[in-house]
Each structure stands twice: as C-alpha cells, then as structure tokens.
Image: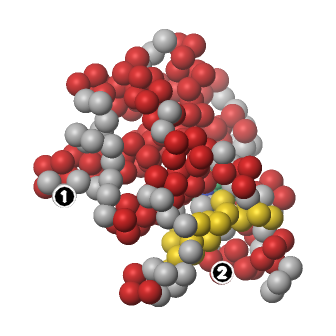
Amino acid sequence: MIDLYTDLTPNGFRASIILEEAELDYQTYRINLAEGDQNHPFFESLNPAKAIPVIVDHDGIGAQKLIIPQSGAIILYAAEKVGRLIPTDPMQRLITMRWFMQIATDIIPVSSWIYNHNNAMPEKSAKNAVWLDNRLNNALSVADKWLAENEFFADDLSVADFLLYPTFHFRRSVLEESKLFPNLRRWGDVMAKRPSVQKGMSVGDRVKPFSDITDSL
Ligand SMILES: N[C@@H](CCC(=O)N[C@@H](CS)C(=O)NCC(=O)O)C(=O)O
C-alpha cells in the first residue's frame, strides 16, 4: 500500500494520475496548503522542503518503506515499479528522457512562474508577464511541433506524457482561446479521455483529511 500526501495542484495531480495509470494500491491524505498542513512536523519529516506531493511506499524496493517527494521522481518510481511507461528500446528510452527533462526544466517551471507572478509574488509587472508568456509559448511550440509528427512524446504513451498533462490541463482554456498549438491540444484531448487521468484528476473526491494522521500521533 502507498500513502499519497497531496493537494489539488498540478504537481499533486501528477502523482495521483501516475498511481492510477500504474494501477498501484494507494490511499490519499490531503495536505491543505492554504491551511498550512505542509508546515506540520510530521509532514516536514516526510519532506523537509514542505512541499507536496509525497508518497510513502510501505512495500518499496526490497520490501523497505520508502518516502519519495518530487512529482517527477514519483512518476519515474511508479513506472519502474510496474515495468511500464519507460521504453526498453534504447532510442525510445532516450527520446522519452529527453522529453521528460524538457518538460521538467523548460515547460513546468515557466508555467509555475506565471502562476506565482499572478498570485504570489510581491510585485506584478506587465512587461514581466509578457516575457513569461512568450517564454512559455516558445517552450510549448517546440512540444507542439513534435506532436505534429508523433502521437505521444515517445512512440507510445510514456512517463513524459504524464509529467506534462496536469500543466496542460490548467492552461487548456487559454490555449483553446488563443487557438495556438493544435497538436498539443489534440494530444491533451487524448490524455484527458484516459480513465487513469480522469480518476487522478478527481482525487479530491477521495482524499482523507490529514487530521486522520495527525490525531493519531
Ligand atoms: N518540484 C516539486 C515542486 C513541489 C511544489 O512546489 N509543490 C507545491 C504545490 S504545487 C507546494 O507544496 N508548495 C508549498 C507551499 O505552497 O507552501 C515537485 O514536482 O513535486
């Protein structure tokens, strides 16, 4: 059994979606970031960075209990645990890892900066907003060109697709309005229809309160 500690954010959904896609047995506790659950000493003992998502696999490598923060690491761990979603063919594996890194380092951070600029940073700047939007569009246009020739990021569905999907989901309405990136939107529609994606995105309906853990400490 895996315990997932998460909230309803793109990074959190990356974890719930991959656990669904890998068909791993898990239960979910909500770390309500707005209420500060991430600062509780128990959660800090799981992730000193005080950030979701975190999984605790009670039956990890060699049957050990493993604590794994970082949505990207959780995706790779779940895929390796079930032996799917990371191609074994060396060329396809390389392509998968190239896109995994491109999404992790070019697309997701800029998307987060845009969110933080609009909602969290102490000062907003119209010029910075345009700069960030251009930077994200540039990164997405590279993905869009690739998806014009390929159904998924590798020759079949892989960890790279699951890494990107929640970021795409939260940008979907803006992309649809702008009519930009038709190939990315076609890919997003295919992803959105997967039962694992739908179940992972609706994890909020099945979360247990964090107090179930903290009350028993
Ligand atoms: N690179 C990390 C980022 C994790 C992260 O920043 N999580 C945010 C929510 S999406 C968080 O927990 N922030 C803590 C806070 O808001 O106090 C990952 O992919 O898991």
The answer to which quarter of the image holds residue 113 is top right
Residue at the (59%, 66%) spot, across then down:
26
In what quadrant does ligand 1 lie? bottom right
Callout 1 environment at 10 Å: few (<14), some (14 to 19), or many (20+)? few
Dot 2 corresponds to which residue?
45
143 on left or right of 70: left
At mark 2, the secondary structure is helix
Residue at the (46%, 52%) spot, across then down:
21
Tell me the amino acid under the disc marked 1.
Thr
Ligand 1 within 8 Å of the CB at mark 1: no
Q: Quadrant of the N terminus?
A: bottom right
Which percent across, then down, holds residue 114? 59, 35
Tell me the amino acid under the disc marked 2.
Ser
88 on left or right of 8: left
How far apart are the alpha carbons under marks 2 and 1?
35 Å
- Mark drawn on residue 88: 1
Residue at the (22%, 40%) spot, across then down:
155
Which percent across, then down, holds residue 48? 62, 75
Residue at the (23%, 25%) spot, across then down:
149
